[in-house]
Image (spheres, grey):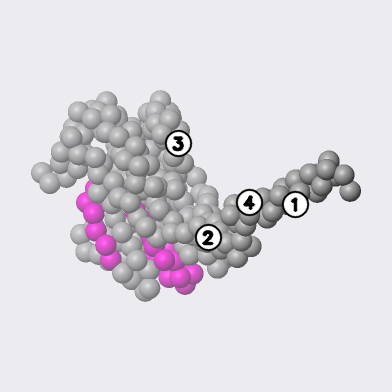
Amino acid sequence: MNKAQKKAIIAAVIAAAVFVVFYRVFSVPESEVAENKSQQESSSDSALTVGWTTDVHCGKAKKLKVDDENIVYPARACENFPEALKRMKEQGADFVVDTGDISNSGDQETIDRMKNAAKEIGLELLISWGNHDGGRYENYFVDRKGWRTVIIGDLNGTMTDEQAAWLESVLQTDKKKLVAIHVPIYLHSTWEVQNIRLEEILSKNKVNLVLSGHWHHGWERDLNGVHYMGGTALTLNDKNAINFQILKL
């Protein structure tokens, strides 16, 4: 064996040794790969974060007064809503549920303005139309992170056979269930259930959470295994207010 051959063999041995050391130092063990994969899969099942607004009443009027303790500011609300969206985005909202009266008069220009604000922020906006939203009515649902969020159009305290049948069908799921409506199932003055048919469907199908608006003041109540919440209007009693909630579900 000549000198050139010996040098080639030595070089090959050194290269092989360097490769082994490099592989051991920089390669990721299979156990770690499996752990990372498991973490990624579990992250898709992490808690659902829902931003929630209600009774924005965006419009031209400077003030809308129900009584001395229930005043909202439509013109200012148009300006405050994008800031609410921005803050909810910063707090990790997966999407935003608005439980109705997002506009004050139901005109398409205002509705488009609210929807475009959400698009610009990069948030999905799900609206349960209210009695100020121009008679709009949509029923639909979205599935996210083990939850089914059901959006019901303005019922105004009543429910048709068609609406009831649709709701019964979409609540047939093993997922946790959130339902958004504008008008609460209760009468404001007495807490008596006014929409008995809806309440029966919600409790029978073991809905976890029901969000509503309409009253402008926040509240919570449990009935037959279902947790009900009412939201605070965006600008309740303060034109500078930016009221919203972040729900970690």
The answer to whether residue 54 is above or below residue 148 is: above
Please state which amino acid type lies under the numbered disc 4.
Answer: Phe
Please state which amino acid type lies under the numbered disc 1.
Answer: Val
Camera-side mark, 2 or 4 = 4
Crowding around mark 4 (Cα neighbors within 10 Å: few <14, some 14 to 19, many 20+) is few
Asked whether the beta carbons under mark 3 and mark 1 sit within 8 Å of each other, the answer is no
Name the residue at 45% across, 36% down.
Answer: 122
Does residue 88 appear anywhere in the picture?
Answer: yes
Camera-side mark, 2 or 1 = 1
- Image coordinates of residue 185 in percent, x first then y, are 34, 60
- Image coordinates of residue 153 in percent, x first then y, are 45, 48
Please state which amino acid type lies under the numbered disc 3.
Answer: Gly
Mark linked to residue 122: 3
Which of the two discs, 2 and 4, labels the residue nearer the N terminus? 4
Q: CA distance from mark 3 to mark 1?
A: 57 Å
Q: CA distance from mark 2 to mark 4?
A: 27 Å
- Image coordinates of residue 28 in percent, x first then y, are 60, 56
Q: CA distance from mark 2 to mark 1?
A: 40 Å
The answer to whether residue 9 is above or below residue 117 is: below
Image quadrant assignment for residue 229: bottom left
Please state which amino acid type lies under the numbered disc 2.
Answer: Gln
Q: CA distance from mark 3 to mark 2?
A: 26 Å
Q: Which residue is mark 4?
A: 22
Name the residue at 16% across, 45% down.
Answer: 70
Crowding around mark 3 (Cα neighbors within 10 Å: few <14, some 14 to 19, many 20+) is few
5 or 61: nearer the viewer: 5
Q: Which residue is mark 1?
A: 13
Q: CA distance from mark 3 to mark 4?
A: 43 Å
The local secondary structure at tag 2 comes to helix
